[in-house]
């Protein structure tokens, strides 16, 4: 139990540091504060799992910076790729897309990201983890376990809220997509530019009824968080509906 608690606190610590890094980069890019994370809380678990993978495989096995860099790069990119596939499979959505990067694999991982992860892996093994590991080793067993249990329960609650919203979101998107499809079918059989132009008139049509308005407005807080955190998010099943919902959220956000 002691070791599991310690590993979990490492996971949360590096998930938080990853969240801070991602949020800082996105906030600078968008010139406003961005909560860059799958969950509501300040953690990016993909960074935590990537860090643990590097620690378990590389820590105390080599001091060679070159080996640490390339091995860490491979390990963390593997974690990122698996995470992308799992999220796409479970929630039918593409959460990030590196297709615009010159060197990428299926848009899920990129060379630039791999280089950054390699550098972070070196810093982790050489400097960061010795400090973090030393801190957790100094904690009394009771404090270590209690902190791990409390944080675990909070994270599980956050995970439940997030997953529940995403499952509900897919149901909402299915209905919105159906209304959009019927709207497009009624007014045109053509595709391309005309279809895109019609999307802007959807709110003026009879298909934009009270039911659709309710579906769009319910869960607005979580929708806004997802739009801000994942600007490149694409629904693999109902992307037209997601883009319409996203545009309404962004328009409302600007007015507020």
Image (cartoon, grey):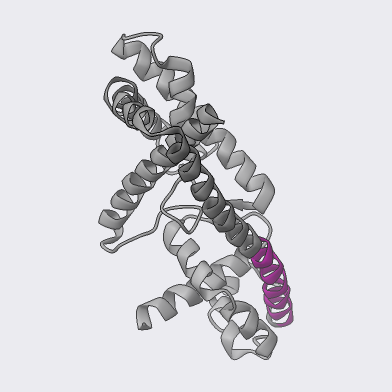
- Is 219 on the left or on the right of 50, as rendered? right
Question: Residue 187's spot in the image, x, y percent?
Answer: 69, 82
Residue 63 seen in the figure: yes
Between residues 106 and 109, which one lies in front from this camera angle?
Answer: 109
Count of numbered labels shown in the rendering: 0
Q: Is residue 71 above or below residue 244?
A: above
- The magenta segment is 167-186
Between residues 166 and 182, which one lies in front from this camera angle?
Answer: 166
Residue at the (60%, 82%) spot, across then down: 202
Q: Is residue 70 above or below residue 148?
A: above
Question: Residue 20's spot in the image, x, y percent?
Answer: 33, 48
Residue 131 part of the magenta-drawn span: no
Residue 28 occupies quadrant: bottom left
Q: Is residue 6 above or below residue 167?
A: above
Question: Residue 19's spot in the image, x, y percent?
Answer: 38, 47
- Is 219 on the left or on the right of 90, as rendered? left
Residue at the (53%, 51%) spot, across then down: 155
Residue at the (49%, 62%) spot, across then down: 226
Q: Main secondary structure of the magenta part?
A: helix
Question: Residue 43's spot in the image, x, y percent?
Answer: 43, 48
- Is 89 on the left or on the right of 14, as rendered? right
Tell me the quarter of the image containing the C terminus: bottom left
Residue at the (49%, 39%) spot, across then down: 46
Between residues 7 and 116, which one lies in front from this camera angle?
Answer: 7
Residue 99 seen in the figure: no
Tell me the quarter of the image containing the N terminus: top right
């Amino acid at each position: 139990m002691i070791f599991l608690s310690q590993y979990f606190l490492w996971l949360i610590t590096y998930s938080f540091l990853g969240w801070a890094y991602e949020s800082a980069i996105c906030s600078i890019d968008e010139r406003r504060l961005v909560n860059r994370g799958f969950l509501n809380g300040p953690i990016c678990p993909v960074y935590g799992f990537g860090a643990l993978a590097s620690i378990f495989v590389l820590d105390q096995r080599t001091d060679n910076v070159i080996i640490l860099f390339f091995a860490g790069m491979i390990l963390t990119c593997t974690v990122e790729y698996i995470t992308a596939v799992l999220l796409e499979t479970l929630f039918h959505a593409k959460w990030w897309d590196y297709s615009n990067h010159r060197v990428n694999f299926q848009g899920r991982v990129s060379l630039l990201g791999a280089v950054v992860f390699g550098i972070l892996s070196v810093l982790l093994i050489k400097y960061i983890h010795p400090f973090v590991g030393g801190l957790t080793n100094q904690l009394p067993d009771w404090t270590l376990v209690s902190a791990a249990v409390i944080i675990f329960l909070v994270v599980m609650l956050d995970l439940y809220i997030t997953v529940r919203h995403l499952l509900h979101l897919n149901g909402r998107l299915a209905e919105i997509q159906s209304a959009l499809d019927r709207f497009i079918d009624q007014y045109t059989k053509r595709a391309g530019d005309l279809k895109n132009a019609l999307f802007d008139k959807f709110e003026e049509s009879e298909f934009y009824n009270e039911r659709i308005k309710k579906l769009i407005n319910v869960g607005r807080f979580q929708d806004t968080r997802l739009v801000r955190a994942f600007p490149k998010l694409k629904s693999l099943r109902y992307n037209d509906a997601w883009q319409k919902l996203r545009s309404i959220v962004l328009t409302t956000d600007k007015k507020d």
